Image (tube, rainbow, N blue to C red):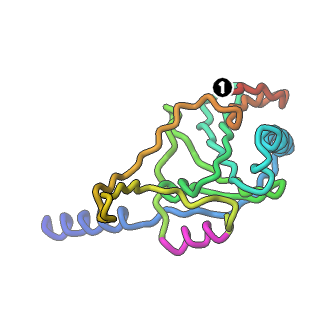
Amino acid sequence: MRLNCGFIILLMGLFSTSIAQTCEKTQIKDPILIDAIGEFIINCNKVNEIYKDMGVIHMGVHPDSGKEEKRINLWIDLTDSFKDNPPQQYAHLWGKVILIYQRDAKGKIIKNEIPPEQLEALLNEVGDRVFVEQRWVETYHRDGSLKRRNYQIGISMGGSPTSIVLLINKKTGEVRKLKSV
């Protein structure tokens, strides 16, 4: 009996780790959030005209900690870097694709691994709004042979006019915007 229980527990552990997470299409229905995203998109377009036709909006939703304000991060990106950690949900709004991520209590984006067919569907939704991010940097000798190939890692330190933190009062609906510089 003990062997069978251990075997069942092992199978349950393997099964639970093999369950894929998903990336679901959703709708943003909160009118306050819709207006804030619209204003954010307008401001991004003012910063650089390329954002009118290009880019995806990333939205990081912080957990509800019982505070009187909801905290949401918005930033725009021109690359397909989201492939490394796809969002849990996505939506269409104001002609943009909004990639919606959940954050943990420390503010870190929760890892989401999805099946290849869901990633392909998300890439089809995004279409040609983003550039393929160059990950490898190659240098060559004068004779044309490969000298070195390095994997390039980008680190974002924040501080961009194309990112903002929204603090939305749950009772009044008032939105405070913490803009980066």
Relative side of 170 to 73, left or right: right
Please state if 171 lies on the left or on the right of 88 as rendered.
right
Q: Name the residue type under label 1.
A: Lys
Compared to 176, does 118 lie above or below? below
Circle 1 Cα neighbour tier, 10 Å, few/some/many (<14 / 14–19 / ≥20)? few
Quadrant where the image shows the C terminus: top right
Q: Identify the residue at image location x=83%, y=27%.
A: 174
**Please, what is the dominant secondary structure of the magenta stretch?**
helix
Residue at (68%, 53%) from the top-left corner? Answer: 56
The outermost residue toward the bottom is 117
Residue farthest front in this picture = 142
Is the residue 25 above or below the residue 174 in the image? below
Residue 137 in picture, x, y percent from top left: 40, 54
Give yes or no for residue 24 being in the magenta stretch: no
Kindly identify which residue carries mark 1.
Answer: 67
Quadrant where the N terminus sits is bottom left
Q: Nearer the viewer, residue 151 or 143?
A: 143
Determine which quarter of the picture holds residue 46. Answer: top right
Name the quadrant containing residue 145.
bottom left
- Relative image position of residue 21 (x, y in whole percent): 49, 62
- Image point (25%, 63%), residue name: 9
Q: Secondary structure at mark 1?
A: loop
**Residue nearer the viewer, 12 or 35:** 35
Looking at the image, residue 24 lies above or below residue 74: below
Where does the image place residue 64, in percent across and percent down from the top left? Answer: 62, 35
Residues drawn in magenta: 116-124
Residue 66 % position (x, y): 63, 29
